[in-house]
Image (spheres, rainbow, N blue to C red):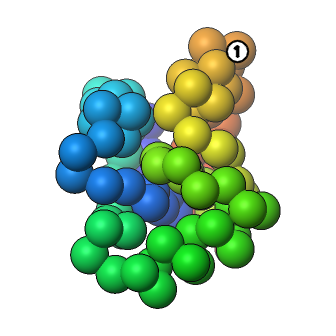
Amino acid sequence: MPVMATVELYTTPICPFCHRAKQLLQRKGVQYRERNVMLNPGTRAEMVDRAGGARTVPQIFINGQHIGGCDELYALDGKGGLDPLLRAEAS
């Protein structure tokens, strides 16, 4: 599956849900940009703003669309909605 989507994850290194989300994306061969919110307070503020106030990690975006966290990513995959998003070219 050629993956062209832009995938961003706001994470921390100590978050098991972050690791789980990254594992799913890696199994699908997806390249993603990881933004560690522990290293930069400004990055956390950016995440909260982009995610509509969500403060937990991970917060996942595909082509700029907020997907949610790890549970939402797996739920989207479970109902067959993740692969089409990952194939969509970033605009």
Q: Can residue 90 be seen in this view?
A: no
- Count of numbered marks: 1
Q: In which quarter of the image is residue 51?
A: bottom right
Toward the right, the furthest residue is 52
3 in relation to 28, above or below: below
* Helix, strand or loop for disc 1: loop
Which part of the image, by quadrant, shows the C terminus?
A: bottom right
- Amino acid type at circle 1 is Lys
Q: Is residue 71 left or right of residue 54?
A: left
Residue on which disc 1 sits: 79
Badge 1 crowding class, 10 Å Cα cut-off, few under 14, some 14 to 19, many 20 or more, is: few
Toward the left, the furthest residue is 13
Q: Is residue 41 visible?
A: yes
Q: Is residue 62 left or right of residue 10?
A: right
8 in relation to 26, above or below: below
- Residue under the point 73% across and 62% down: 53
Residue 45 place in picture, x, y as percent: 56, 78
- Residue under the point 41% across and 81% down: 41
38 in relation to 4, above or below: below
User: Of residues 78 and 88, which is closer to you in this image?
Assistant: 78
Q: In which quarter of the image is residue 2?
A: top left
Q: Is residue 45 left or right of residue 58?
A: right
- Residue under the point 30% across and 68% down: 38
Q: Is residue 49 left or right of residue 8?
A: right
Q: Quadrant of residue 21?
A: top left
Residue 71 place in picture, x, y as percent: 57, 26
User: Of residues 51 and 76, which is closer to you in this image?
Assistant: 51
User: Of residues 90 and 66, which is closer to you in this image?
Assistant: 66
Toward the top, the furthest residue is 78
- Residue under the point 37% across and 55% down: 11
Residue 6 place in picture, x, y as percent: 51, 63
Which part of the image, by quadrant, shows the N terminus?
A: top left
